[in-house]
Image (cartoon, rainbow, N blue to C red):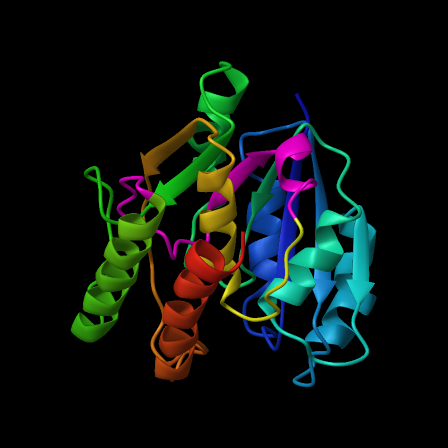
Amino acid sequence: MRLSVVVPCYNEHKTIKNLIMAVKASPVQNKEIIIVDDCSVDGTREILKKEIEPLVDKIIYHDVNQGKGAALRTGLKHVTGDIVLIQDADLEYNPQEYPKLISPIIEGKADVVYGSRFIGGQERRVLYFWHMIGNRFLTLLSNAFTNINLTDMETCYKAFRRDVIQQIDIKESRFGFEPEITAKVARMKLRIYEIGISYSGRTYEEGKKINWKDGIRAIYCILKYNVFSK
């Protein structure tokens, strides 16, 4: 089975090259890499054009910054693999863990796999207490409406059968993608698995972008896509 790795990217000049090299070095040999640059202005776009274009299958460039959800919406139109996996352009998540993320799909047990930062014995960088509380609260709230028992709804690492993800109409353009896709996947009555993953989070000084406003939007999206939008 072929794996499609979709990398939404915005202002990641410090990490983008190392990240792509890590993706290429991941243990899954049969894969394509699709990057969507969401109108980076920090030199990332120049690195992509000069150094990374020959290394990957496709790079799409947004002319206007639209957000992570919009970048994923663009990238998902171009995937050709049997399995689709989302990979952030920073170095918080480890591509060496691709095999365990996609194995439940390959084995025919799962349609969707979430990589959880909160289960298993994997290493995890110690960072912000209130971020952890926020993530757990949003996951709990999402679970209350979807009636599924995820431990990490906000995780970047999500893998899907391509026929599943391409039939979902993604509306959210920023980080609201996470609760939106979770609500829609849950409604489809799919087989969802979780796998424990490692996590090397960043500080804001190191480039972390999500903030409290995105948390408020996530609450809105949980309500919107579970209660008001079927």
| Left or right, 135 with reference to 51 | left
Viewer-proximal residue among 96 and 191: 191
| Left or right, 14 with reference to 202 | right
From the viewer's perspective, is residue 32 above or below residue 208? above
Q: Is residue 91 visible?
A: no
Magenta span covers which residues?
147-168
Q: Position of residue 157 (x, y in %)?
A: 46, 47
Q: Can residue 44 be seen in this view?
A: yes
Q: Residue at x 45, y 17 (%)?
A: 109
| Left or right, 169 with reference to 212 | right
Q: Is the magenta stretch mostly helix, strand or loop?
A: loop
Please identify the residue farthest to the top as the structure is shown.
107
- In magenta stretch: residue 154: yes
- In magenta stretch: residue 221: no
Q: Position of residue 43 (x, y in %)?
A: 69, 81
From the viewer's perspective, is residue 224 above or below residue 147? below
Q: Residue at x 22, y 65 (%)?
A: 132
Q: Position of residue 141 (x, y in %)?
A: 27, 58
Quadrant where the N terminus sits is top right
